[in-house]
């Protein structure tokens, strides 16, 4: 059986088309996609105003989130486990603050009752 000769013209066409698809496809998408400024210009004036006003808060929230993720990644545990532990600690802290506030309010009410001369509960 005779070996077929290599078709160099076909190989060149395939390489050129492959390169055009690999490079030209993403380049075309980048050329067609609108920038953030172009999208904001298409908003109505109210949305543009709200977008500008909320930009700083959104950026700060994102920066805080990334900072927390960096802290979580320093642990040997998976990030989602450390994140859940931090969330549980935050919930426990909030519950303790609520209980402390409730106790303080109860004490203030008792002081008011004592000052006004009303009978207190026993």
Image (spheres, rainbow, N blue to C red):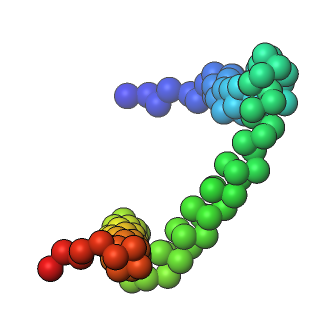
At 53% from the left edge and 77% from the top edge, which residue is drawn? 71
Residue 24 at least partly seen: no
Q: Residue at x 62, y 64 (%)?
A: 64
Where residue 87 sits, quadrant-wise, is: bottom left
From the viewer's perspective, is 68 left or right of 32?
A: left
Q: Quadrant of residue 42?
A: top right
Q: How many marks?
A: 0
Q: Residue at x 15, y 79 (%)?
A: 122
Query: Which of 55/72 is in front?
Result: 55
Q: Nearer the viewer, residue 79 or 51?
A: 51
Residue at x 39%, y 73% (from the top left corner) = 116
Residue at the far left in the pictured view: 122
Decide if residue 46 is in sight here. yes
11 in relation to 80, above or below: above
Could you tell me residue 88's position as x and y percent?
32, 70
Residue 36, x across and y down, in percent: 78, 32
Where 110 sits versus 18, above or below?
A: below
Viewer-closest of 106 and 101: 106
Residue 23: horizontal and vertical position, in percent? Answer: 72, 33
Q: Left of 104 or right of it: where is 70? A: right
- Quarter containing the N terminus: top left
Q: Quadrant of residue 84?
A: bottom left
Position of residue 44 measured from the top left corner of the image (x, y, whole percent): 78, 16
Q: Is residue 113 toward the left or the right of residue 19 in the image?
A: left
Q: Nearer the viewer, residue 20 or 5?
A: 20
Q: Compared with residue 48, is residue 108 higher up or lower down, i.e. above or below?
A: below
């Amino acid at each position: 059986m005779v070996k077929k000769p290599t078709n160099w013209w076909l190989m060149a066409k395939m390489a050129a088309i492959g390169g055009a698809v690999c490079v030209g496809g993403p380049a075309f998408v980048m050329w067609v996609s609108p920038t953030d400024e172009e999208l904001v210009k298409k908003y109505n004036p109210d949305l543009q105003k709200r977008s500008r006003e909320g930009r700083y808060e959104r950026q700060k929230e994102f920066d805080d989130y990334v900072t927390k993720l960096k802290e979580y990644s320093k642990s040997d545990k998976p990030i989602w486990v450390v994140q859940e532990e931090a969330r549980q600690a935050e919930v426990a802290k909030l519950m303790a603050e609520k209980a402390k506030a409730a106790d303080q309010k109860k004490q203030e009410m008792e002081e008011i009752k004592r000052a006004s001369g009303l009978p207190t509960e026993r």
